[in-house]
Amino acid sequence: MKFRKKPVVVEAYPVREAFNIETLEGTMHARPGDWLITGVNGEQYPCKADIFEKTYEPADTPPPSPWTLVSERLPDPVRSTRYLVTARNRPIVAVWDVVKKDWRLAGVLLEDVTRWMEIHE
């Protein structure tokens, strides 16, 4: 089974001087360049900078949208694939016709598609 880490906001500060800190796992050593994280239960622990950068992002940064604007890019699949699109502000499941290079629903051309995302089945 696979699991995704729940989005949790934590406080974190860069470590400027080396020190030891008592954590739930015992005494840990924080070094300059590490981050000191305060977890959801108030516990504190150091985190190496490279791990911190891979795991955390500023909380005021919105997560990336799964939608792609048609004005930015069209799909480029090697075969027709199903997509969720918005046309006239309604969500519709459509197929990108790789030959005709347009959106189709049951063979009918869809106009006014503004954004799309691939459906992973």
Image (tube, rainbow, N blue to C red):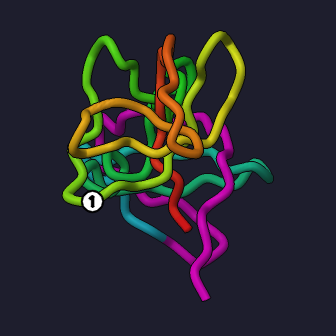
In the rendered image, which quarter contains the N terminus? bottom right
Q: Nearer the viewer, residue 53 or 29?
A: 53
Question: On the rendered structure, is 104 left or right of 97?
Answer: right
User: Of helix, strand and loop, which one carries label 1?
Assistant: loop
Q: Is residue 36 visible?
A: no
Using the rendered view, name the quadrant where residue 28 is placed. bottom left
Q: How many marks?
A: 1
Using the rendered view, name the quadrant where residue 102 is placed. top left
Residue identifier under label 1: 79
Q: Nearer the viewer, residue 6 or 113?
A: 113
x and y, in percent, of residue 109 in the image: 48, 28
Magenta stretch: give its range.
1-27
Q: Nearer the viewer, residue 100 or 41?
A: 100
Using the rendered view, name the quadrant where residue 94 is placed. top right
Amino acid on which the number 1 mark rests in the picture: Arg
Question: On the rendered structure, is 86 left or right of 65?
Answer: right
Residue at (27%, 16%) from the top-left corner? 72
x and y, in percent, of residue 79 in the image: 27, 59
Q: Is residue 85 visible?
A: yes
x and y, in percent, of residue 80 in the image: 34, 55
Residue at (36%, 34%) from the top-left corner? 14
- The extreme bottom residue here reads 1
User: Can residue 66 be found in the magenta stretch?
Assistant: no
